[in-house]
Image: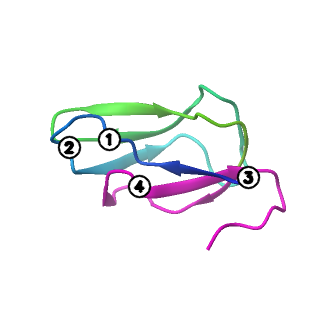
Amino acid sequence: MVQTVVLPKLGQTVEESTIVKWHKTTGDAVKKGEVLFEMETDKAVLEVESFFEGTLLKILVPEGQAVPVTTPVAFIGNPGEPLPK
């Protein structure tokens, strides 16, 4: 089953964050607890770990792009699985 990775809301006042760096690329194996990407808020740069295990099927938000919190940023699942629209 394909899992959606969302940009976490890490504070009550944080409405938007920027993905600074992806630590995985499309096709990479991902284990639960591994760092997927780094995000920058108005106060800090933080590492975001995966809650899912599988293969990084698609990155939706590239490095350097700011998006609202809770925005889908990637999909993790099994190779060949259809992605959500």
- Marks 3 and 2, how far apart in space? 31 Å
Image quadrant occupied by the C terminus: bottom right
Task: Give the secondary structure at mark 2.
Answer: loop
Task: Give the secondary structure at mark 4.
Answer: loop
* First in sequence: mark 1 vs mark 3: 1
- Is 28 or 13 nearer to us in this picture? 13
Q: Residue at x 56, y 55 (%)?
A: 74
Question: Of the residues shown, which amino acid type is indicated by label 3?
Answer: Gly
* First in sequence: mark 1 vs mark 4: 1
Classify residue 45 as left or right of residue 59. left
Is there CB contact under 8 Å for labels 4 and 2?
A: no
Task: Give the secondary structure at mark 1.
Answer: loop
Is there CB contact under 8 Å for labels 1 and 2?
A: yes
- Marks 1 and 3, how far apart in space? 26 Å
- Marks 4 and 2, how far apart in space? 19 Å
The outermost residue toward the top is: 33
Q: Which residue is mark 2?
A: 14
Q: Which residue is mark 4?
A: 63
- Is 55 or 4 nearer to us in this picture? 4
Classify residue 30 as left or right of residue 43. right
Circle 4 or circle 2, nearest the eye: 2
* First in sequence: mark 4 vs mark 3: 3
Q: Which residue is mark 1?
A: 9
Q: Residues within 10 Å of mark 3 (few under 14, many from 20)?
A: some
Q: Which residues are magenta?
A: 57-85
Circle 3 or circle 2, nearest the eye: 2
Query: Does the stretch in magenta take in 61?
Result: yes
Question: Of the residues shown, which amino acid type is indicated by label 2?
Answer: Val
Task: Give the secondary structure at mark 3.
Answer: loop
Is there CB contact under 8 Å for labels 1 and 4?
A: no
Q: Residue at x 22, y 32 (%)?
A: 44
**Which label sits on residue 27?**
3
